[in-house]
Structure formats: structure tokens, C-alpha cells
Image: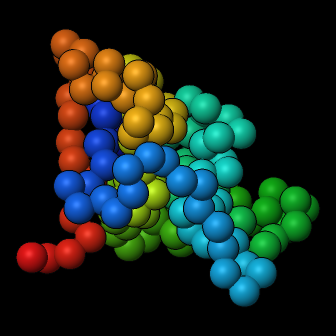
């Protein structure tokens, strides 16, 4: 899976919020957008797209550190043995109002849709901008 370079994934045209919202899980279990948010908020510009998708997957498996260390390569290969949706399909920009900024190294930072930084990224020369996928087909 390739990653984005010097790109902003903007919020979906039909994003239901007017300002960024922190995702929450349901029934005591963390949701995928909640895990993605927590990982990106804790370590801005640390993860590439494949690394974030894998880290989210591993958290949902609830593996201990020893088991993860022993099986990381196997789990990585297994996870990416089939195609995965890119972060344009993430609920962060589709539903929760978070833009995803990829720097020149492909590392991801969160950008709230109402922030001055988001507006500046939208006008930045040389930065590719893509819309997140729509929530509905219509």
C-alpha cells in the first residue's frame, strides 16, 4: 500500500459536523475512528498511512506487547495480504470533521476543519488536496 505525500485529505462534502469532534466508542469498546484519532493525536506526524492502519488493527486485536513483538511481521503480512481502503474512507474526515495532512515524508497529522491551519493548508501551493469519500452515494 502506498502512502500520500504532501497531501491534505479534506473533510467529506457531506460531513455532518461543522467543527471537529473527538470520536467515541460504543458499548465499552473503542471504535476504529477513536483508535485512529488517539494514535494521531498522541503522536502527530509519526505514522504513515500503512502504519496507522496496521496500528489500529493491532489495537483492536488486543495483543500483549510480547505476542505483538513475536508476531509483528506475520501480522503485518497477513493484514496487507488483501487490499485495504485508504484513509479517504476513514470516518475521521467523513464524519468527525478532521482533515488528514500528510507531510513530505508521508507522516500524518490531524487538522480540525474549523482551524486556521486547515484553511491555510487548503491554500498552500504544492500541497495536493483530496476530498474524503462521501458518506452517501446520492
- Number of on-image labels: 0
Task: Look at the picture and state if 68 lies above or below 97.
Answer: below
82 horizontally vs 29: left or right: left
Please identify the residue farthest to the bottom as the structure is shown. Answer: 27
63 horizontally vs 87: left or right: right
Q: Residue at x 25, y 16 (%)?
A: 124
44 horizontally vs 131: left or right: right
Confirm whether residue 34 shows in the render: yes
Q: Position of residue 39 (x, y in %)?
A: 66, 48
Give the quadrant of residue 47.
Answer: top right
124 horizontally vs 72: left or right: left
Please identify the residue farthest to the left as the structure is shown. Answer: 138
Q: Nearer the viewer, residue 77 or 17?
A: 17
Task: Look at the picture and state if 93 lies above or below 64.
Answer: above
* Quarter the C terminus occupies: bottom left
Q: Position of residue 5 (x, y in %)?
A: 33, 29
Q: Position of residue 53 (x, y in %)?
A: 52, 58
Give the quadrant of residue 30.
Answer: bottom right
Q: Position of residue 117 (x, y in %)?
A: 42, 22
Amino acid at each position: 500500500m502506498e502512502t500520500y505525500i504532501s497531501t491534505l485529505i479534506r473533510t467529506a462534502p457531506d460531513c455532518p459536523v461543522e467543527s471537529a469532534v473527538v470520536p467515541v466508542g460504543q458499548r465499552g469498546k473503542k471504535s476504529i475512528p477513536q483508535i485512529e484519532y488517539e494514535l494521531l493525536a498522541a503522536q502527530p506526524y509519526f505514522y504513515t498511512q500503512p502504519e496507522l492502519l496496521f496500528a489500529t488493527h493491532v489495537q483492536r486485536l488486543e495483543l500483549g506487547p510480547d505476542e505483538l513483538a513475536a508476531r509483528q511481521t506475520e501480522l503485518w503480512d497477513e493484514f496487507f495480504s488483501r487490499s485495504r481502503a485508504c484513509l479517504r474512507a476513514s470516518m475521521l474526515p467523513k464524519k468527525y470533521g478532521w482533515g488528514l495532512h500528510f507531510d513530505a515524508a508521508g507522516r500524518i497529522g490531524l487538522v480540525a476543519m474549523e482551524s486556521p491551519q486547515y484553511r491555510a493548508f487548503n491554500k498552500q501551493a504544492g500541497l495536493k488536496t483530496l476530498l474524503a469519500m462521501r458518506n452517501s452515494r446520492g
